[in-house]
Amino acid sequence: MRIDGIGEFAARDARDAAEWARVAAFCARHGQAAFSRDPHFGGHVTGSAFVLSPDGASVLLTHHAKLDRWLQLGGHCDGIADVAFVALKEAYEESGLSRIRLLSDAVFDVDIHEIPARGVEPAHLHYDLRYLMQAEAGEIAASAESHVLAWVPLSDLSRYTQAESVLRMARRLAGQGLSEGKNASVTP
């Protein structure tokens, strides 16, 4: 099933199918507002980038300044209903890289997670759509949103993070034969 502004996603298991159904229902219920940053709808759509190194052996992670955890790059749509574009834009803004290639227009992974209340913002959900990308040129440089960036070998990922959502994306890569230095050409 295709969702306007998001694209298609090939569910690999029951968890995937359930998450995709939740995203579809949220977008159908809220329309364009689902892509806003307003947490008062109970959440909003966000876009993330799982950026592979040029050789496909590592992934670019940020040590997120606010969350104090290693995560993939990404952020809010801020009203833009083109989540692949948002994920790519966030990858550029947060990485310092000068050329990044979107490996597929299809969603690579879906993760719905709660963001705790902060200040006047109530707790809400991020309907996070992740896209697979590959760095092609440039040197990494952390933005103000990061303590530091690192190219983390996929084989060492669990030393940096225990976040299931990040580890799941690495397992997806391994299942497609794209990790450990293999050519990162993908079909969803």
Image (cartoon, rainbow, N blue to C red):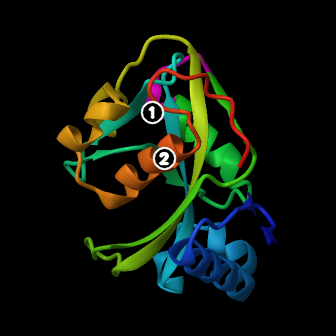
Tell me the residue that label 1 is attached to.
94
Is disc 1 placed on a helix, strand or loop? helix
- Residue density around tag 2, few if under 14, some if 14–19, many if 20 or more, within 10 Å: many
Q: Residue at x 31, y 33 (%)?
A: 155
Was residue 96 drawn as part of the magenta stretch in this picture?
A: yes
In x, y percent, where is residue 131?
60, 47
Residue extent of the magenta highlight:
93-99
**Looking at the rendered structure, which numbered label has been put on residue 151?**
none
Residue 146 located left or right of residue 176: left
| Sequence-wise first label, 1 or 2 | 2
**In the depicted view, which residue is nearer to us: 78 or 101?**
101
Was residue 92 drawn as part of the magenta stretch in this picture?
A: no
Q: Residue at x 73, y 42 (%)?
A: 187
Q: Is residue 50 above or below residue 4?
A: above
Question: Could you tell me which quadrant the N terminus lies in?
Answer: bottom right
Badge 1 amino acid = Glu
Residue that lies at the very extreme toward the top in this rendered image? 138
Q: Are marks 1 and 2 in contact (CB under 8 Å)?
A: yes
Tell me the residue that label 2 is attached to.
74
Q: Is residue 141 above or below residue 74?
A: above
In x, y percent, where is residue 49?
53, 42
Badge 2 amino acid = Gly
Q: Is residue 50 visible?
A: yes
| Quarter of the figure with residue 85 | top right
Q: Is residue 147 visible?
A: no
Residue 64 located left or right of residue 42: left
- Spatial CA span between label 1 and label 2: 8 Å
Q: Residue at x 48, y 41 (%)?
A: 174
In x, y percent, where is residue 142?
34, 26
Q: Is residue 69 above or below residue 100?
A: below
Is disc 2 placed on a helix, strand or loop? strand
- Residue density around tag 1, few if under 14, some if 14–19, many if 20 or more, within 10 Å: many
